[in-house]
Image (tube, grey):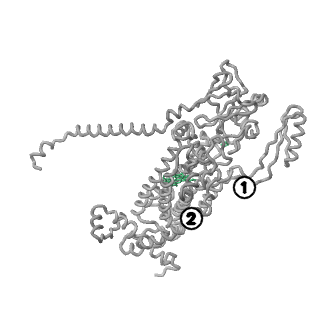
Amino acid sequence: MSDAQTKPHETVDEDRRDFIHIATAATAVAGAGALAYVFVDQMNAASDTKAASSLDVDVSKVPVGGEIRVLIGGKPFFIRHRTPAEIRAAQSVDLSSLPDPQSDEERLVPMQSGEYNPAILVTSGSCTHLGCVPVGPAQGNTGDFGGWYCPCHGSHYDTSGRIRRGPAPANLPVPDYNWLSAAVINISL
Amino acid sequence: MSGHASTYEPKTGFTKWLDSRLPVVRLAYDSFVDFPTPKNLNYWYTFGGILAVCLMTQILTGVVLAMHYTATVDGAFASVERIMRDVPYGWLIRYIHSNGASMFFLAVYIHMFRGLYYGSYKAPREILWILGVVIFLLMMGTAFLGYVLPWGQMSYHGANVITGLIGAVPVIGDSIKAWLMGGPSIGNQTLQRFFSLHYLLPFMIAGVVILHIWALHVPGNNNPTGVEVRKDKEGLKQDTVPFHPYYTVKDGFAIVVFLIIFAAFVFYMPNVLGHADNYIEANPLVTPAHIVPEWYLLPFYAILRAITFNLGPIDAKLLGVIAMFGSIAVLFFLPWLDTSKVKSMRYRPVARQFFFGFVVAGLLLGWCGAANPDDPIIPMGSDKLVVSYTDANGNEATQTYEEYEAAATFREQKMSEGVEAIIAVEKAPAFRFVHLAQLLTLYYFAYFLVILPLLGLRENPKDEPASIHKAVLGHDRAAPAPAE
Ligand code: HEM
Ligand code: FES
């Protein structure tokens, strides 16, 4: 190239270059961030997965002293129809002796009338230790406290689903549910 | 690479043409044919080649399995059964893949212990070692994901336990867990992403393997003496032999022996390393009585479960997770934790004892991982039966028995009096698996965090040989008296 051609380019405007560099880099970073957001967010629960996360259950079908187990979004839940003796056992415990103190009533949800129905106990079906599904009346083993027994590492739950002995740190959680009528509850995740 | 001048000379017209455009033959020649390799490598050094074979085996059989496999909760278990029964030689390909994972880990553990023994993680091979630990982590991830795919009981509930661990992380744990599973629980969406990632990770491993070999070829191999190859022309010539044919043949022989053992598993005991429960289709409502991971993850599972106590604000569950990840994370820092200037344990008589202790600790941790933590190893006394009842004054009372008969009779007698009575087992004191696991976990961490750092400063190592050449000729023993 001849001198004549290169001359006009010899004065370099540094500020202008810096601006272009910074603007380019900033755009690239913003673009990468937006893209990363999309690729991270796609891993979250999809709309249909979320939509499948509540269930109506007719509790009048549960036999006294028995339970039914339902899966909501793949998670197990217990719906137990407690006998009067089981309810009494659940209510008469000295709360201060519990690893995770909660009264039986705190673990129930009032019906539309505002009254409690202590016969129906609804709890999560995954052991608070490492998530195994405890066995109950249908499997012929209710543990030392009459509720559930987790065979994985030996956690015993009482008739209110409270942890009494074993490695599990907490009571079986009570899910979000409400009474649609005297016989039907809606459980949601 | 590696500073040694390329000795490749293309001979034909085509190889000359290729060499001036893409010198790939030159790269292969310099890396695997005329690569100067210490002449004293023993069979512990053949496991790198064996691992390369393992990775290729897994990728080849895996790609074939993927042609027949269905990644849906309704189809996965049946598609694996179809592979076993209907696909021509499907049983063989699946057994090679499932046992191949075990053989892969067997080889990687030997490879890593080799590195620990000969000090191969020390300067100038820190990056080489760290890349190895990265490969190990990716392998564990891949194997965990792969084990979920057949959608058996162990697949499902094992994955439940492992994802449950993430939930132990405070504050963000539950959202990360839901994000990984793509929903409230392990479901179809989880299986699909696990399949996709199980397909991807082995290729990432292959990528890291290339970096690993690159990082090997810059400083060159370590060797059983831990003494570096001399850099001068004469020294280099005395200390090394070309990779081919010396080590291609040695590695080849080791690979054949390894494949014989591999084949013995595939053809004669394809399921001994697995769990019968995984031939039952996953059922979220029924948990198998005893959930255990595959054998190669057992030591880490044992460390996880050994932590049964809280430490300040950190509860046992989280602490267990920290200990488990910490047990691998500590390997990344090993090059700087070991303060000894002497690489090979051959010349570190005290450190060697601790090393063998470490190997035993690793094996015993595996044993603890497979067992029920509460089972006694050394019982001290026998279990008793305690009958609890309410006595005539309305007080809680108990009665202890050795024999079930007597306890049951007493309980029945109380029941017939209208008194509620229950029998519980009172466990006799014992040295249990959980106690052993706690001691071993302590040793595991002490080895890296206390023993190696202190020993390097205080021990009295033996004299290292002057060179690899001298060591091979048996001149590495200390001279009886100054001869000069
Ligand atoms: C690092 C290499 C790999 C390791 C350690 C590994 C490990 C495993 C394991 C442990 C299983 C469960 C086996 C069983 O019990 O049935 C499995 C299954 C599977 N893997 Fe891999 N794998 C690897 C590479 C691959 C690759 C590259 C593919 C390619 C797509 C693949 C595709 C599959 C498929 C489709 C299954 C399900 C079928 C079955 O369970 O046999 N794997 N893998
Ligand atoms: S998971 Fe229930 S006791 Fe461990």
Q: Work out whether mark 1 precedes mark 2 in sequence or the reverse, and give the earlier one.
A: 2
**Residue B72, horizontal then vertical, whole percent:** 54, 44
Q: Secondary structure at mark 1?
A: strand
Q: Secondary structure at mark 2?
A: helix
User: Which residue is at 56% across, 47% downward?
Assistant: B76
Left or right, A145 with reference to B53: right
Instruction: Give the CA distance from mark 1 to mark 2.
Output: 35 Å
> Does residue B482 sit above or below B67 in this rendering?
below
**Residue B140, horizontal then vertical, whole percent:** 53, 52
Q: Is mark 2 within 8 Å of ligand 1?
A: no
Q: Which mark is residue B263?
A: 2
Q: Quadrant of residue B124?
A: bottom left
Residue positioned most to the top: A113
Residue at the spot of label 1: B377
User: Which residue is at 9% across, 46% downward?
Assistant: A4
Q: In this view of the protein, can residue B329 be seen by the observer?
A: no
Q: Camera-side residue: B430 or B108? A: B108
Q: Camera-side residue: A70 or B120? A: A70
The chain holding disc 2 is B
The chain holding disc 1 is B
